[in-house]
Structure formats: C-alpha cells, structure tokens
Amino acid sequence: MPSVIPRYFVVAESSHELQNPTSAEKLLRLGRRLSLGSGSRVLDVASGRGGPAVLLAQEFGCTIEGIELRPEFHAVAVERAAAAGLSERVTFELADARHHGLPDAAFDAVLCLGASFVYGGLAGTLDVLEPAVRPGGHVVVGEPYWRRLPLPVEYEDRSEPFTTLEGTVDIVESGGLSAVSVIASSEDDWDRYETLHWSTIERWLAENRQDPNAAGIRAQHDQAKRNYLRFQRDYLGWAMLVGWKRP
Ligand SMILES: C[S@@+](CC[C@H](N)C(=O)[O-])C[C@H]1O[C@@H](n2cnc3c(N)ncnc32)[C@H](O)[C@@H]1O
C-alpha cells in the first residue's frame, strides 16, 4: 500500500463501507469475541471511512475513538457516525497515528485493521498498541499473510514483509499477548473488496477524463487488477487476529 499513489486509494475506496476484505458478519463476530458492551472503550487506529467503528458501536453500544490520516476518509466517518445518531459515542480524530501518543492501559480493545504499515510492520504496531490496552483487554490487528509458499518469482508483492499465518500468530505472541482468535477472509470477501475497486475506478475514470491523475490511476488500476487475478487471489490471505493481554 505505501508504494502506490495516495490519490489512487482515495478514489478506489470511495464506495467501500469496509476498507478491508472482510464482512459485517465477521466484524460482529469480532465484537462478540472481544465481549464488547456499553461499558467498553475502544480505539480504532487508521479508522478509514468509519465502517468498522460505526458497526461495532451500533451493535454493542461501546464507545469508539478513531484516528485517521486522510481528510476525505475522516470526513465520511464523522458523517456516518452522525447519520447513525452515534456522534457522542463514536468520534474520529484527523491525525497521523505515527505521531499520536496513546494513553497507558486506557482501552478495553485497540484495533488496527489493515494499517500495520503505519508503524513499520506488525511487530512495531504491537509495540505501540499493546501498552494502550488494559491487562485483560485485547489488541486486534487485521493483517495480510501468505496462504502458501513458495511464491512465484514473477509475483512483485513477494518483497512485502508478510509471513505465513503461523508466523503472523508467532509475532502476535512475541510480547505479552496470547492469540485467542483468528477471523480470516474468504475468497468471496476478497472478491467483494477487490472488485469494488474495479467498479469505483471505472466509474470515476469515465466521469473524470480530464483529471491530471487519470492516466496514473488507470495504470495503477490495471496493474492492481492483473496482480490480483494472477497471484494475490491465490497467495494472499488476510485475517483479524485477536491478542489477549494477559493480566
Ligand atoms: C486499508 S484502510 C483500513 C481502514 C479501516 N480500518 C477499515 O477497516 O475500514 C487503511 C487506512 O489507514 C489510513 N492511514 C494510513 N496512514 C495512516 C497514518 N499514518 N495515521 C492514521 N491513518 C493512516 C488510510 O488513510 C486508510 O484509511
């Protein structure tokens, strides 16, 4: 994700409710696994357009604070919380999470879904997030992993710093967390997430032919689509991993 032009993602994800290959049903399962309730305080780092936060707050009555870098996504998240009548309990700060201090042991759960690159990878993410969770609380990371190895030599993403699911769980457990749940994406979750990029981009390109970024976005789109069909759909997994902070 960091190697692509930022505008591409702002356009490609402008219709996504959830900006990851997962589903509302899986997020609700996550909420049940976390035992969220009206007394729970949750932090959502890189909260995007607010889909997971609004869904969890609606279902479980918890309080959620999001941090999001992109103004376009942050604005949609704020609107969504207001439209759901949740502005008191679901708030979003427009900020760079890398430079945002977190209070110690303040949250029942801290989520970072699809954004461990913010802290230089999974291990760095856990180093930052774990102290913010109270003992007995949970850290949740939504993380890519390789479904099988070896990867084809011509697969460009093979230089990404991912590992197997087993290796990912080992990283989660390398500090003070025990992995207690894995909620993995299905092929259908991936197709829904990826092909919504396709339809959104095609519509945007048809409506914005004169945009100075149009050619770059078309090239990025063609490359991402080809990469998905050739390699990613077979080799790349994604899962929400729940780490329990041992008391
Ligand atoms: C894959 S999206 C996931 C969004 C959301 N967690 C979800 O599941 O719908 C990654 C998000 O990370 C945000 N992001 C990237 N760098 C960030 C940073 N330094 N601080 C805060 N958010 C950041 C992006 O703008 C984007 O909204």
Image: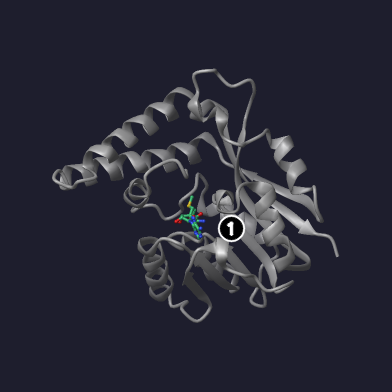
Coloring scheme used: one colour
Which residue type carries mark 1?
Leu
Measuring from the top left, give residue 88's x and y in whole percent.
50, 81
Residue depicted at 64% across the width and 23% down the height? 149
Residue 78 appears in the figure: yes
Toward the viewer: 230 or 58? Answer: 230
Measuring from the top left, give residue 83's x and y in whole percent.
38, 73
According to the picture, the residue beneath numbered tag 1 turns out to be 28
Q: Residue furthest front?
A: 99
Residue 33 appears in the figure: no
Q: Residues within 10 Å of mark 1 (few under 14, many from 20)?
A: some
Q: Residue furthest right?
A: 247
Q: Tell me if 109 is positioned left or right of 210 in this view.
A: right
Toward the viewer: 150 or 196? Answer: 150
Residue depicted at 41% across the width and 71% down the height? 78
Residue depicted at 32% across the width and 39% down the height? 198
Q: Is residue 188 above or below residue 135?
A: above
Q: Residue furthest bottom?
A: 88
Q: Is residue 64 above or below residue 167?
A: below
Judged from the image, the secondary structure of the residue bearing numbered disc 1 is: helix
Measuring from the top left, give residue 93's x and y in whole percent.
48, 72
Toward the viewer: 82 or 167? Answer: 167
Measuring from the top left, give residue 94's x and y in whole percent.
45, 69
Q: Residue furthest top?
A: 153
Q: Is residue 171 above or below residue 18?
A: above
Q: Tell me if 91 is positioned left or right of 63 in this view.
A: left
Residue depicted at 64% across the width and 56% down the height? 30
Q: Tell me if 40 is positioned left or right of 155 in this view.
A: right
